[in-house]
Image (cartoon, coloured by chain):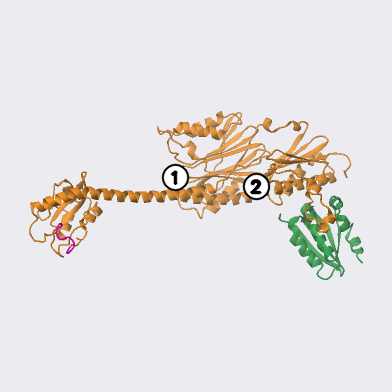
Chain colours: A green, B orange
Amino acid sequence: MPESRIAMNVRKPNPTTSVIDIEGEVNAGGELILMGAYNEAVSDGASAVVLNFGGLEYMNSGGIGLLVTLLIRAQRQGQRLLAFGLNDHYRQIFELTRLDEAIRIFDGEASALGDVP
Amino acid sequence: MSTILRAVSQLFRREQDAPSHVAAKAGSSLALADPVEIAPNDPLVAYFQSSVGAVDIDILSLDSPGLQALRGAGIKLVVPLVSQGELIGLLNLGVRLSDQDYSSDDRRLLENLAGHVAPAVQVAQLVRRQEAEARRRERFEQELRVAQIIQQSFLPRESPNLPGWRIAAHYGPAREVGGDFYDFIPLDDGRLGLVIGDVTDKGVPAALVMSATRSILRAAARGSSSPGDVLRRANELLCPDIPRNMFATCLFAVLDPFTGRLGYANAGHNLPYMRTSSGVLELRATGMPLGLMPGMAYEEREIVIGSGDSVLFHSDGLAEAHNGAGDMFGFPRLMGIVGGCAPGTDVINVLMAEMTGFVGGGREQEDDVTLVTLAREAAAETSSARDVGNEVLAAFTVASKPGNERIAIDRVAASVQPLDLSTGRLERLKTAVGEAAMNAMEHGNHYQPELPVSIRVRASRTQVSVEVTDHGGDQEIQEPQAPDLDAKLAGEQSPRGWGFLLMKSMVDDVRRTSDGKLHTIELVLHRGGDDDA
C-alpha cells in the first residue's frame, strides 16, 4: 500500500446529511482514513454523505477502487453518496467509470445539500 | 625446554618414599619425583646435551640452579635423553633401593633404555605439536569461513540494469578475507547511489565493520542527495562505534542516469578513473577515511559521463598486487590499461587478465580485489530508427516503490512544459503516466526496489510519446477484464482493476511491446485537436 497524503474532515451541517472534506491524494493507501471518516459521518444517523473534492490533488485507479468499496458499503447501509468540487479532469474520470451514475455530482455544496430531503 | 625436562622427570621415584631402582619392583613402591624445572639457558642443559651416558649428580661441579634443584630433589643419577642431537628429556634417578651405588651394569641398562626412549618421546612430542597446530589452523579456517559469509552476504547479488548504461562489478576475495565492499543504492528519484570501500584489518573484525559501514551508508544515502553530506553523516555515525585503530576508506557517488551527471565524494579511497575519448582522468575529491575522527567535511565534485565514456572504481588489491620479483602492479599501469580500452570493452575482464599475467600463475592473491565499472553506451547503441524526427525531452528511471508514480508524473509534466499542452491534455497525460508507472512497478517489477522503471518522453510536431519500461517482459501480455461498475457493485468483480481503462481512455493510443526481458507501454497523445478526444 502506498502511503497516502490525505486528510479528511467531517462536518454535519444538518441531521440528515454529513460532509467529508477531502484534502490531498486519494489512492489505495487512504482506505483506513476514508472508512474512518465515513463511520464518523454516519454515526449520528445521517442518511446521506457528501464528498467534497475541492481539495483533491491527485486520484488514481486505486482511489477509484476505494470509492467503489465505499459505494458498496453505502448502498448496503441504505445511505446516499453525493459529491461536489471535482475539477473537469476528475469529473471526466467519474463519467468514464460511470461512478457519476452512482454518486451524483453537484457544482457546489449548497446544491448538493439541497438535493437531500 | 624446561617443560620437556619436567615431563620426563616425572617418570621417576621419590627418594624419601623409598630408595629405588628404576628397573626393579615396578608397582609396589613406585613413586613419581617432583618435577624439576631447568631453565633453557642453564649451563646444565648444554652439559647434558654433550655428555655421553649417565651423569653422577653428586660429583658434578657446575654453577647451575638446575643442578641445585636436582640435588634438592634427591636425584643421584641423570641419563640424558638425546635424539638426533637434540636433548629432549632426562631420566632422573634417586638413591638405589639397596643404598649401593649404581653399578656399571645398571648404567649400561639405563643408557640402553635411554637410547630407546629418546626417539619415542621425540615422536610423541612431535605428534602433540602437530595436533595443536592442526587445532589452531582449524580455528583459523573457521574464522575465515565466518568472515567470508558475512562479507559476501552483504555484497549485491547483481548489478543494476539501467537503460543506456552498462554497470558491472567484480569482487575477488583474498584467502584471508580483506574488508572490501561495494554497493548499489537505488534512490527514490531514479538516481543510483554507488559505494566502494575498504575496511582496514582482515577477517571477522573487518567483515563486521564493513557490514556496519554498509548499513550506515545505505541509511545516510536515502536521507540526503549530496555525496559529501552522506559521507559526513556516515562518519559521524561510525566514529563512536568503530574499534580503535580501524577505519574505512570509501568513495560514494550518485549517478543521474538521464543526464550522466556523477556527483561524488571520497573518504580516503583510491581515485576512480574516467576514460573518455580524450584520455583518462583521475576523479579527485579530498576527505579523511570514515571512523578516524568526528567533525570531518568531505569535498564534493561532479562530472558528466558522456556517451561512450566509462568510470572505473577500484580497491587496493589490484594496484598493490606484487609479482614474483616483488614489483607492484601500480597505479600508472592500471591507469594506462584503462586508457587503452576502446569504448564498449569489458574493462574488468581486461584488468583481471592483466593482473594474472603480471602476478604469475599459482601465486596466492594478497588482498581483496574489487572493481566496479560504470559505462555509458555510445549514442549509436541506444538510438533507434523510431527516434527520427522525435526529440527526446526526458529519460529517467524511478525506483519500484509504492507512491513513486507521483515522481514519474511530476517529471513527465515538467519535461512537456515547453510543448504548451492544454490543461485537459496535460491532466490526461499525467493520469495515464501515473497508471502506466504504477502498473510497471507493481506487475512488471513486483515492487522490487532494485528494479527501476525507465521512462522516456519524446515529442514530434504532432504528438507526445511516453514509454514506460519494466522488467516483466517474460510475462504474457493479456488485456485485463474490462471493469464494469454494476458488476463491481453487485460483488461480481473486485472493486479494483480500473488502471488499464484509465490509461487507455486518457491518451490517443497505447502500444505494448515485450522482448522477453523488458516490457514497454508507450502512451501516445496528439498535441492538437479536440480537447475531449
Residue B24 against residue B281 in the figure, above or below:
below
Residue B445 against residue B271 in the figure, above or below:
below
Q: Which mark is residue B176?
A: 1
Classify residue B11 as left or right of residue A62: left
Query: Is tag 2's residue or tag 1's residue first in the polypeptide sequence?
Result: 1
Residue B51 image position (x, y, % from top left): 14, 47
Q: Is residue B233 magenta?
A: no
Q: Amino acid at mark 1?
A: Glu
Q: Which mark is residue B70?
A: none
Residue B303 against residue A1 in the figure, above or below:
above
How many marks overall? 2
Q: Which chain does tag 1 point to?
A: B
Query: Closest to the observer: B515 or B306?
Result: B515
Magenta part of the chain = B22-29
Mark 2, other Cα within 10 Å: few <14 / some 14–19 / many ≥20: many
Residue occupied by mark 2: B187
Query: Closest to the observer: A31 or B322?
Result: A31
Q: Is residue B28 magenta?
A: yes
Tell me if I can see residue B287 in this picture.
Answer: no
Separation (CA) of disc 2 from disc 1: 34 Å
Tell me if I can see residue A112 in this picture.
Answer: yes
> Measuring 15% from the left and 62% from the top, which residue is drawn there?
B15
Q: Amino acid at mark 2?
A: Leu
Residue B459 image position (x, y, % from top left): 78, 36
Secondary structure of the residue carrying tag 1 is: loop
Query: Closest to the observer: B517 or B454?
Result: B517
Residue B106 image position (x, y, % from top left): 11, 53
Residue B55 against residue B306 in the figure, above or below:
below
Classify residue A97 as left or right of residue B182: right
Secondary structure of the residue carrying tag 2 is: loop
